[in-house]
Amino acid sequence: MQNGMLALFISLFLSSASAAQFSADEVKAVYLFNFTSFITWPEDAFKKPSDPFTYCSFGNKGAVTKPLGEILLGEKVDERAVKFKTITKISDIKGCQVLYIDQLQHTNTEEILRKTKVMPILTVSDMNGFAKQGGAVEFSTKGGRIKLLINVSKIKDARLNVSSKLLRIADLINSPSEADEPW
Amino acid sequence: MTDFIKKRKYDLYQLIISETLMNKSFKSLALGLCCSCCSVIVSAANTNNLQQLKGFSLEDLAEVEVSIAGKTLQKLVDIPAAVYVLTKEQIRYSSATNIPDLLRLVPGLHVAQIDANKWVVSSRGFSSRITNKLLVMIDGRSIYSPLFGGVMWDQQNIMIEDIERIEVVRGPGGTVWGANAVNGVINIISKHTRDTKGGLVSTIVGTERNIVSLRQGGELTPNTSYRIYAKHREQDKSISLDGPDANDSWRDTQAGFRIDWQVSKNKQFTLQGDIYQGDLSERIRVPSLATATFTDLLDDNIDTNGANLLAKWSQTNDDGSSNHLQVYIDHTEREQWIISEHRDIFDIDYQYSVEPLERHSLMFGLGYRYTEDKLPDGDINTGQVHFFTPDNKSDHLFNAFIQDDITLKENSLWLTLGSKIEHNQYTGLEFQPSIRLRWRPVDNQLVWASISKAVRTPTRAESDGLILFDILSAGPPPIALVLQGNTDLKSEQLVSYELGYRYQASNEFIFDASAFYQDYDNLVSFESTGLVSPAIPTPIVALSNTLDLDNLLEGTSYGVEISTVWFPNDQFSLMANYSYLKVEISPKHSSLDTMSESQEGLSPQHQFNVTSSYKIQDNLKVNLIGRYMGELSTSNTDAYTELDSNIQWQASKKLSLSLAARNLLNNAHSEAIPAVYPTAKTKVEREFFIKIDWLF
């Protein structure tokens, strides 16, 4: 029985290492930030040239938002200022370029994905099965590492252009079989 | 950035948290760290990390090993108990070749070798081969012996290379772990099969032992991984106290497997098992009619074998609640002069953590254990006197526990309340409550305090045994030392008061201290009935000094345990531990026990050890471990200082070599003297070995 029990019992010595190590949330946050270098949004994703590039987090649960907020501080994407906000209703989704839904949020992703189906929004989550469900990018944990699972057809629907560099390091689903696909 | 990566890799050695861990398995929570609720503290150091991480390429990012339990980890510093974790890197750099030797690195634990196949491992006093107040588990399977208490360390032969970490709690853990976790709990946790893919041949060739281990791991399906292993040890004899070789060489073989199936993201299943067989020697003094002293030396062969199988299921639900179920069976056999034991254990344990409410983090658990043993009578005609009444017995143990972790003040003050309720066949119902308070005045410091109760239940031998241990004098008439069990024996009780402090100054320095005062009652006493005719007629013994067991001792202990870690840079690290212990035992007025007071000196008052690791090059590392052990006044064992050292060379990705020396300072030194059971007194010798690890 007492199996896991001690398991969590990591002493301070581990924590010393942990400080120098990265948490999964930190890695996810950096991924989210890096996406903008490898993905381009269609022009109609923004109303005005002066509109900021907007990261949205659906709900404030989950610890990704904290490092993400820190990373985004003072950053620019394609000459646009970067804004980071938390939304709580699907109706607030307009103006978001990246929508992150933390698995701890326990929200109805189906509705969100239906609503954003053809919108130029990059939907990202660490929820299991998110990409399969129709989300664009899923963070999956494999062998203690955070890997990307990209739903290619969803990206297409959203009219986002993803560089091959990003696709190369990711696992793809719903990928067109043609080898000469212009990604 | 390259420097940083180096540093990162160096630090990673300390910790790769498995997903199992992440799933917040069992009772750790129980001790009161709610893992689900509180927010993460982002220290300055972490922010710095983030900036580094930001500079990573996509490819780098995809290869970063993350502490999935990141959120939890920060909280782990917050455990309100005297905990220590031996990491796999410490294990690797220690040059220890067995579990007791590994435990020498843990602050506050007393480890001593009695002879080549017997050890003492104890926490906070009462050291003996059968340290009955310390609970030990391997992957949650108890290896505490219900027969005498304590652990038969020679029967534990998992691959050292497969150990993920060893978690040690000093002080009572009864609220969570149940009976016998009085002075401490040790859990040895093996690696997830995800981390042991591929083949490994590990060979140790040395002056005291030769060990070969084989392991093969891989994936069965994308979500299922496995490993199988086999290990064989040949151990040389030690030397006896007065010079010549002792007859205590031994060899054993163990094999086993583990399968991990990630059913889905939140569900996982583990199945693991081991099978082993051992063949050991010891020289003991036995009763004999053939000599004038009525004793003779016997070269006894001990045969051990056993097998176990464990299955574990855990599921974390979307609402933050989680379920864990664990079932195991364990069969052990041990045949030797003093005892012959066959035992089967079936254990099932379930735990549920309720979805965290606003201020409360509640969990409860239920468990059941069935034990059945066969303890055949000794052959009285040869003076082999061990009888159990009855000689077959089955026990049922039921337990339940509940615990609540309450946030008194957001991010700074918590209270944990809980109790175990256990029903056993020896003493009936036992309650083991505890209350723990933890306070975080600032982010990098923690102060904790606790009051807890724990019990040790009588062992099978203490309850039902009649055992002749030794002939005390030739007489006439010859007098034997006979231990007589007592079915009315009560549980030993402990109330412990503990106080602890932790401080983490940046990533480079950590300080941890705990102080305790422990108050024992109903400790088992040996009530001499004077010289009487033995309860069982034997051809030899005319009279026996029979010791009836009773609960007529009380005692206190107090002490401090301090440990520090210092990582000034990525080439060098230094860890130092010190512990002080004082035990006082006194018989109650009605007691006739005149010998137990000397138990005060079974454990050293002072212990000190220092570990330093120095990286000469990326692939060359030198480790030094210095140990000081205070004297054991009960057995007149002198204090000693020893030094272990090794050089480890990573010749290539696949091949590593190390050259190790243990106990460098003395040709041989004495660490412990056998107490009741009269085996030969021996010394631990200086030892050299080469270890070759080849991955394929």
Image (tube, coloured by chain):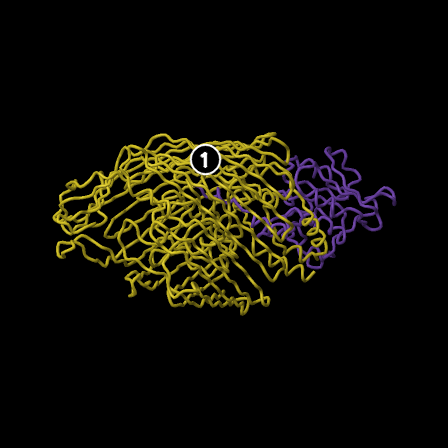
Chain colours: A purple, B yellow
Q: Tell me the kind of residue under disc 1.
A: Thr
**Residue in the image at 40% along x and 50% along y:** B121
Estimate the x, y position of residue B215 in percent, counting from the top left: 44, 60
Q: In the drawing, does residue B648 fall left or right of residue B151?
A: right
Residue B25 visible? The answer is yes
Q: Quadrant of the N terminus of chain B?
A: bottom right
Please name the residue that numbered disc 1 is placed on.
B175
* Residue toward you, B386 or B504: B504
* Residue toward you, B236 or B200: B236
Choose top left, top right, bottom left or bottom right for residue B459: top left
Estimate the x, y position of residue B346 in percent, counting from the top left: 35, 41
The chain letter for the residue carrying disc 1 is B
Q: In the drawing, does residue B580 fall left or right of residue B252?
A: right
Neighbour tally class for label 1: few under 14, some 14-19, many 20 plus, Cα within 10 Å? many
Q: In the drawing, does residue B512 fall left or right of residue B55?
A: left
Residue B232 visible? The answer is no
Q: Secondary structure at mark 1?
A: helix
Residue reaching furthest to the bottom: B651
